[in-house]
Structure formats: C-alpha cells, structure tokens
Image (cartoon, rainbow, N blue to C red):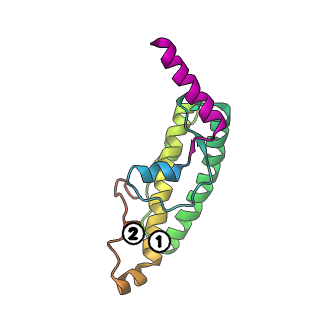
Amino acid sequence: MDEDWFAIEWEFHAFSKYHGTTYSPAEMVECMGRVWALERNMFQYCLCPQERFSVPNMNQYRREWEYRMDESARLRQSLRQLGQRRPKQRSSEIPRDSNESLELAINIIRNENNQMQIRLNRCVNSREVELRGIEHLRQYWTDGDLSDE
C-alpha cells in the first residue's frame, strides 16, 4: 500500500515539474467564485505542494510583491483623483521576513488591488452602467470585506 502511495506521489511530483501544472492568482481567485479585475497571468506558481516554498516560487513572490506595491500606488492615486474611497493598506503592515508571511502579504495586497481596480472600473464606467442598466453584472461587484481609509 505504501509503495502505491509513493509511486502516485512521485508521479504527481514528476508530472508537475515537467508538464507545467501551474496556477496564476487570477485562476485561483476565479475558482473561488470571485471576480478578478486586474491583469491576467503575469505570475505563475507551481501547483505541487512540495514546491510551495521552492526557490523559483519565492523569487516569483518577491517579484510579484514589488509589482503589486507599484500597482497599489498607481491605483490609490487614480482613486484619489476621482474622489473614491481606498482600502486600508493592511498588506504593508505584515512583516515579510518568512516565506509564509510573504505569501500572506501578497494574498492580502492582491485582494486590496483587485478591490481598488473594481472600484475604479465601476467609477469610470458608471455612466455607461446607468445608461445600459447593467449594474447587476459581476465585474461591478466588490466583496465588501475591506475597510476604507
């Protein structure tokens, strides 16, 4: 029995390394039934649990953190110019000294940026939405789980 389990685990591990079983943040958010409003498929991570904190994944997390911080500043400025509310930046309060805390901070900043992009889309497209009566579409919903500044 243990030999079968080992063979299946090895096969999964080998398959995930060579056949590209990866995921993007957009795919993960959408599979949970939420709306992803940001760019798609810029960052890819290995799906294998044994590779969760591998060097390539952690390098990708660090690149994504820098990108998301720049994106956050841009989105905050756009919302400020339009007089819209901005979520509190809780992601910057999390220390990023371990792999787990960096992963948590990135998950939080993804959510913050996604909510800001949804608010920005809704604000910019509000006239079109009012004219067409399509406010019920999911791309204009927010999850409402962030508190505002």
Query: Residue 101, how many percent across, how many down?
Result: 52, 34
Three-letter code, disc 1: Asn
**Residue 70 visible in rendering:** yes
Q: Above or below — where is 136 with respect to 130?
A: above
Tell me where residue 131 sits by quadrant: bottom left
Quarter of the view holding residue 95:
top right
Rate crowding at label 2 as few (under 14), some (14 to 19) or many (20 or more) other CA atoms within 10 Å. many
- Residue 2 within the segment the image draws in magenta: yes
Residue plotted at (60% across, 33% down): 15
Q: Is residue 39 above or below residue 78?
A: above
- Which quadrant would the N terminus be assigned to in this image? top left
Q: Nearer the viewer, residue 17 or 134?
A: 17
Q: Residue at left 53%, top 63%?
A: 76
**Badge 1 element:** helix
- The question of residue 68 being in magenta is answered with no
Q: Which residue is mark 1?
A: 121
Tell me the chief SS of the magenta region: helix
Q: Nearer the viewer, residue 99 or 52?
A: 52
Name the amino acid, label 2.
Answer: Tyr
Kindly identify which residue carries mark 2. 140
Q: Which residues are magenta?
A: 1-23
Q: Which mark is residue 97?
A: none
Q: Earlier in the sequence, mark 1 or mark 2?
A: 1
Q: Quadrant of the C terminus?
A: bottom left
Residue farthest top in this picture: 2
Q: Is residue 95 visible?
A: no
**126 displayed left or right of 24:** left
